Amino acid sequence: MRYMEGEFIINGKRKVIQFENDDLLLDVLRNNGYKEVKCGCREGTCGSCVVILDEKLVNSCQVFAATATGKKIITSKGLGDIKNPHKIHKALVDAGAVQCGFCTPGMVLAIYYLLKEEKNPDEEKIKEYLDGNLCRCTGYEKIIEAVKSIIEGKYG
Amino acid sequence: MDNFINVKKQKRKIDAIGLATGFEKFTDDFSFPNMLHLKFLYSPHPFAEIIDIDTEDAEKMEGVEIVLTYKNTPDKLYTTAGQGFPEPSPYDKKLFDKYVRFVGDYVALVGARTLKIAEEAINKIKVEYKILKPVFDVEDAIKEDAPKIHREGHYLINAIYETERNISAGTEFRYGDVDKGFEDSDFVIEEEFSLPYENHCALEPHSAIAYLDERGRIVIISSTQVPFHARRIVSFLLDIPVNDIRVIKPRVGGGFGAKQEVILEPYVALVTYRTGKPSRLVLSREEVFVSTRTRHPAKIKMKMGFMKDGFINSLKMDVLMNAGAYGSHSLTVLSNVGSKVLPLFNKIPNILFTGKSVYTNLPVGGAYRGYGATQGYFAFGQMIDIITRKLNIDIIEYYKKWHIKEGETSPVFEKLGEGKEGVTQYINSCKLSECIDIGAREIDWFKKRGKRIRNGDKVRGLGMACAMQGSGIPLVDMASATMKMNDDGSFNLFVGATDIGTGSDTILTQIAGEVLKIPSENISILSSDTDLTPFDVGAYASSTTFVSGNAVRKCAENVKEQILNVASEILKDEKENLFLDNGYVFNKKGEKVSFKDIALYAFYKKNQFQIFGYASNVENVSPPPFIAQFVELDVDIKTGFVDIIKFVSVVDCGTPINPKLAEGQVEGAVLNAIAFALTEDYIFDKNGRLLTNNFNKYKVFNTKDKPDLKTIIVESYEKAGPFGAKSIAEIGMNGPAPAIANAIYDAVGVRIKELPITPEKIFKKLRYGF
């Protein structure tokens, strides 16, 4: 075990954080207040803990924090808050796509990544981009509906 | 036409924006200084006696604060089943026992400064086991020479319980004479069906945190469906008065029955009680799979005798259910295999329903969305397909003819309840025939059923199944609510009802708002905090909308009376002349007074008092919702692979209080059930160790697996329900498996009676006929 210190740029803010050399990015984020990053499996199989790490969507449980120092990290709170939600937040809420909501912050980022990568994704593309994010409540129906409503321009 | 202003409106789920952004809190999002992290040591053996445990090395480790084993914990039998008291489940479990009964049973618990230390300490515990011969198969377990898994368990209620034969529960009910019924039938068919374990796979793992408040009371934050039962059970196990325990349910990341179990709460409470420090216990995904609860596997034998015209003369259903190592819910799930299925065809004159739940050295069964009905309908739904094919009758016409109708009853309602006799009830609302017609149109039934349309190696098939469920447990489930009016005419609503992601907090404000004729947004709700909210049994048995919803309706009516009393004083008019509209009380002369002025008057002006409503609610009926589910699929005859093209659910849930949330309940249940039908499975090695213990090996559906899901709500009006509502949370789980099995038969003529329906099973049947 070895203590380390590293700088991360989380949701646009520079943060110097101390951690152990084998700490996962997931734990470092959660231990420092980024509780919107959820832990559903710790095995890279459910997508609850995804973050945007230097423009890429990654399972933060599969990344050592030590390898993420100096990088830009975006979480769901980084996209918006209760007073000023992002259009992805709004679309999911309007579509009734949020049930228990445990997968949702991760799903939000998967959708964010999809919309960044693809200008006009069809349903197949949407499903492809979201297939790493498990949801047991919704059957994905309304989540996909929400994504479509954004693509159709309902949220500008 | 109704003039609802809240009910049937697409109100946004009140916590949705906080959940989506990540501001809402789940159990593990709370953290406290000096918190201890807890980790279990699990049994590596399916059945063993612990001769000794040496925890010295673990306890000596820097950072380890407590190690619990059978040596230093209460020696009390209890059940983890989060049911009303006395629980209809056997008291057969201890916090820690000298016997371990499955791979994954608790041996010890370590509390340490960090999780890493706790995990290291676990490895330093030395356990001496005397390995005992396990039994994994239910048929073997009831044999005389089988190992006896339990010796000292008991029920608090009168129930069948035979530890000598590993029987954790038994049930039987009959009417008429089935044997004579079979003799008198034109045809008799007999089939056997089986279903495996299923895991709920709520995305949030089981989690609990405890700490002492400023007065030394134990506060438990828990991911639970049953906060009040959790408080009661912790009180019993730790011998602490109920008023010294507070259970808070924050947001819950899915339950589906998995959290209708009081699994972790006693352990965090005990650690905190002993050490004085906060403690945290959050399970890993593997621990959730292995050591929490599951859907009970079942083997179901069905025999049905029927006449040429389709009349079913006699029905025999025998269920052999695997309880696993402990008997949680093993009586009531077993009863529900019959009680939630057999009333659907209420004109069968001769019925014999028998069942046993059997202990084995495998993971523990429990509550799971559908709760026995899912198991029963897998058998029943295929039997109906087999009968109608034999008689050459269209299955949809057959269901329409024989399903229970409005004004009718079934003897099953009265005979079979939850661990005891049931309650007689007549059906007030049933639009199942309409559901069937609409579903048939939506799936294009008449054009595609039985046509075996071929495209390369793929053959198209259509199948359907119908089901009912209930709405709460009559004369058992109790819900209550309180509500107070604030200075500005807004309200706070307090309910014991437990929102586990379903949106019940939202729909309960819609119900209260409807009574008071104000937008539901003017009502803030607080739910499931045992210090602050009145009692509710919790989120299970499809009870919240119906049972808790009616409690809220009555509570709001109580508030309304008080508002009218004050308005009558202010307007100097008789109460009978007054009515509510959009935050005002009007009289017939057109005079009005606002809720705000009423609240200010009551607080400050004259005859001051707090406008405060209260109501409890118990129901003497459990109105069933009904569903017709249709599937269109392709079977690849070269590989046996099934591709679901479209799945249609048409459901009668009475009035949908919030249509979008109602649809969401069905969509979630349906995709869960499709995955259960096709891919989800518990596979064990020869020592009873679970191999499918993660999301790579235990396949739940993701977006790419998802077929086109169509959900249609057919409104009925259930006069016993709040604004006509019935339940909807569980029913969607029941139809997919039989509908899919029926559609596979429709496509390729093979009948798979064992879940999951894997490509291998279809391929073997196609190729070798078995």
Image: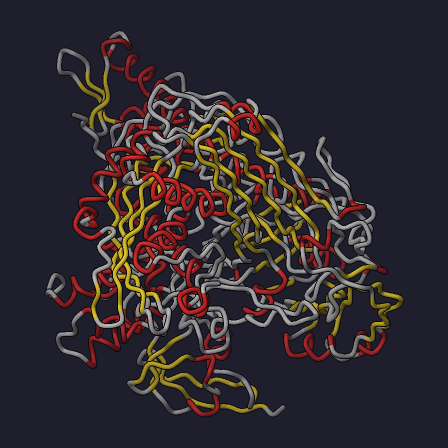
Establish if B135 lies above or below B517.
below
Q: Is residue B574 above or below residue B202?
A: above
The quarter of the displayed image where residue A134 is located: bottom left
Residue B394 spot, x, y in % from top left: 27, 40
Q: Is residue B647 visible?
A: yes
- Does A73 appear above or below B694? below
Position of residue A34 measured from the top left corner of the image (x, y, whole percent): 43, 72
Q: Quadrant of residue B343?
A: top left
Q: Choose top left, top right, bottom left or bottom right for residue B509.
A: top left
Q: Is residue A121 left or right of residue B475?
A: left
Quarter of the image for the N terminus of chain B: give it.
top left
Can I make out residue B603 in this image?
no
Please tell me whether residue B338 is drawn above or below residue B666 in the rendered image: above
Q: What colouring method underlies this structural image?
A: secondary structure
- Name the residue at 52% across, 39% down: B303
* x then y, percent, for residue B316: 54, 35
How many marks on residues?
0
